[in-house]
Amino acid sequence: MLTFEELYKKVVASSISKEVDEDLINLKYDPYHLECILKPADSPSPWKTCNDHCRNEDKYFIKCLFEHFLKKENKESELNEKCKGCLDTSKVDKLLASKDIISVLGAINEDSRPVFALVAPAFLSQFNIVSDGQLRSAFKQIGFAGMVEVSLFADILTLKEALEFDKEINDEEDFQLTSCCCPIWISMIRKNYSALLSHVPKAVSPMVATGRVIKKIIPDAFTVFVGPCIAKKVEAKDEDIKDAIDVVLTFQEVNDIFEAAKVDAEKLPSDLREHSSSAGRIYAVTSGVSEAVRSTVHRIRPEKPIQVKAVQANGVKECKELLKSLENDKIEANFLEGMGCVGGCVGGPKSLIDKDLATEKVKKYAGESLYQTPIDNPYVIELLHRLDIHTIEELLEDNKIFTRYF
């Protein structure tokens, strides 16, 4: 059986010049970039204090918030008078209005479990930061143990779907529906087009894969997915995958926390971790998933007679039209991608910036990756190794991390 390390070396060696450092072929990489997943306790950060008054009393934002958090008999919540001069009441009210925010801040306040922010690939420029590494620093200032980019796990699922395409699609009439990204798309297929489910790979979404891997490596971890999508809150509670994510917060909810805690991300140092490929990073935009799978299939098996011929649906209306056309045999494609929001995840209802600008930022970030596809990415190979997944067969077989049963 071909191992991923062998496949990696074969693919990389076939496309680099002799002048390239042998470290690339030999899977050498900087372990610092995986520490946020494998060794979060090695880089602790102090919590952010909310103002000079609290700083003088050596209090932190979340500790201060919960210390002066009173419960009335009718179960309504309010801030103690002592804290009203310390915290902006209108901004704190936004936090108190969200049970999900309070659940996350409560987990941090208890300080008994490491709390991780799992950030969707659409995060680029969503917050007021100069460099992307400042977002990780901002989360740590609040009290999170670390921030993990979901794009790394989009890489792994891209590799899985590419290998499934290579194995299963050998007929001009056959096709594959992506299962990796949008819960609206998958829900639409499950509820209204169940006859097509046999064409959907049994893969969880990148959000679920990220949560499950973190909980496998750090069993007591509290996982918080952060993105622009409201539908992810529903997906995270689905019975068959609810083991992965403890809470889903939107970009808007996280921004409310930063504002209430007076986190000035622009002034924070950058804690940048480069561990995802271009393929994983473009999941946030329409056509991103199909392009990721297409480029990976071609990278793994350039000689394959049938390559990915994709068609995309952009928004709910187009998703319905695409599935209807497929049902009526009017589609000449072998890989179908659907996104419930126009523009993809960057067009989600809780995105903080315009979808066109967000698309531009995501594509720029993808273009800056050190790796084009997941099979070129040594961090993917190393993470699979840590999960005791070494061969193509082991990734494709049913397992408790990456498999979903529709």
Image: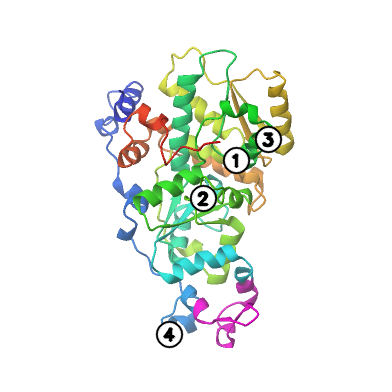
Residue on which disc 1 sits? 182
Cα separation between marks 1 and 3 = 11 Å
**Mark 2 or mark 3, earlier in chain:** 2
Provide residue 325's location: percent of width, then percent of height.
Answer: 72, 23
Q: Which amino acid type corresponds to the residue marked 3 in the rendered image?
A: Asn
Q: Which mark is drawn over residue 57?
A: 4
126 in the magenta segment: no
| Contact check, label 4 and label 2, Cβ < 8 Å | no
Q: Which mark is drawn over residue 242?
A: 2
Graded by Cα atoms within 10 Å as few (under 14), some (14 to 19) or many (20 or more), the crowding at tag 3 reads: some
Between disc 1 and disc 4, the foreground one is 1
Label 4 sits on a secondary structure element that is loop
Label 1 sits on a secondary structure element that is loop
**Mark 4 or mark 2, earlier in chain:** 4
Residue on which disc 3 sits? 314
Query: Measuring 51% from the left and 25% from the top, which residue is drawn there?
Result: 294
